[in-house]
Amino acid sequence: MNDLALGSIPIEKIEPGMTVRYSQTISDADIKAFAGISGDHNPVHVDSEYAERSRFGKRIAHGLMSAGFFSALFGTKLPGPGCVYVSQTLVFKRPVYIDDTVTAAVTVTKVDKEKGRVFFDTTCTVRGKAVITGNAEIFIPKSKS
Amino acid sequence: MNDLALGSIPIEKIEPGMTVRYSQTISDADIKAFAGISGDHNPVHVDSEYAERSRFGKRIAHGLMSAGFFSALFGTKLPGPGCVYVSQTLVFKRPVYIDDTVTAAVTVTKVDKEKGRVFFDTTCTVRGKAVITGNAEIFIPKSKS
């Protein structure tokens, strides 16, 4: 068995301050698909007439959709395939609207090489303002090659 | 303007110990759709040949997909439409595989009527074992009727 660190960044090369980013413009299709998968058909996400009368004024994206971009960065960029998601904290600071471009960034804050753990600051911003803040812990299994 | 507490449970009726649940059997379609929305095409989610050689032995669902069921419960059942997701912590305890039935449960732990805040324990289980644990805070805006 091989834990497939191949294609990912080995823990020896990971240092505090390293950052990777991903940006995506949120569309109606994203929101409808997320509602379908999650079962979250809260009208503030899917019903424009309801959303207009709500505190948000128009439809907003599911908060956990933007959080999915953190998962994408961990699983495909830093550390990349083979890593294990241990924990994530999320504080939802501002709403995300359709046509907003969300930029997710994960930044290494601490590396525990002995235990194979990497700790991250995780932030989503829209036009430079934080919409989600939080922290994550990632485990990198030792390669058995 | 009306914050549309209509259809949701008013904070006066929310008490510690109240629980709502949602169950969903995870399919390939869920995983592919989540990968498409989030950009998380980590091969452990989408590539069976890779996943067979990984520590998990077969493809696993994105952890944040199961977390989406908490959002669904808050936004549609307890407290229901009109509430605002403030924060969520997530600890990923075990993998979720295709054909697993995930049961999400959110249980009220504390109610701060003055500040309109409700605190929850949040858990996803598969066959009675926890796959995700965590906590959430929800804000219920005062109705302006």
Image (spheres, coloured by chain):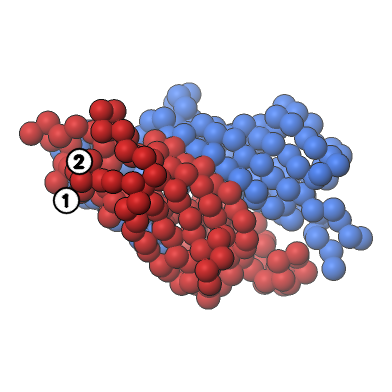
Chain colours: A red, B blue
Q: Give percent across and percent down for residue B13.
A: 84, 38
Instruction: Give the residue at x 64% y 68%.
Output: A59
Q: CA distance from mark 1 to mark 2?
A: 14 Å
Specify whether B85 is left or right of A61: right
Tell me the element at label 2. helix
Specify whether B143 is left or right of A74: right
State which chain disc 2 sits on: A
**Closer to the camera in the image, B141 or A105:** A105
Instruction: Give the residue at x 65% y 50%.
Output: B85
Tell me the element at label 1. loop
Q: Above or below — where is A107 with respect to B97?
A: below
Q: Give percent across and percent down for residue A123.
A: 48, 55
Examine the rendering and report whether any part of residue B26 can be seen.
no
| Residue topped by disc 2 | A12
Disc 1 with disc 2 on a shared chain? yes
| Residue topped by disc 1 | A7
Q: Give percent across and percent down for residue B144.
A: 89, 60
Q: Give percent across and percent down for residue B31.
A: 36, 51
What amino acid is found at the position of numbered circle 2 in the picture? Glu
Q: Above or below — where is B70 with respect to B122?
A: below
**Closer to the camera in the image, A78 or B4:** A78
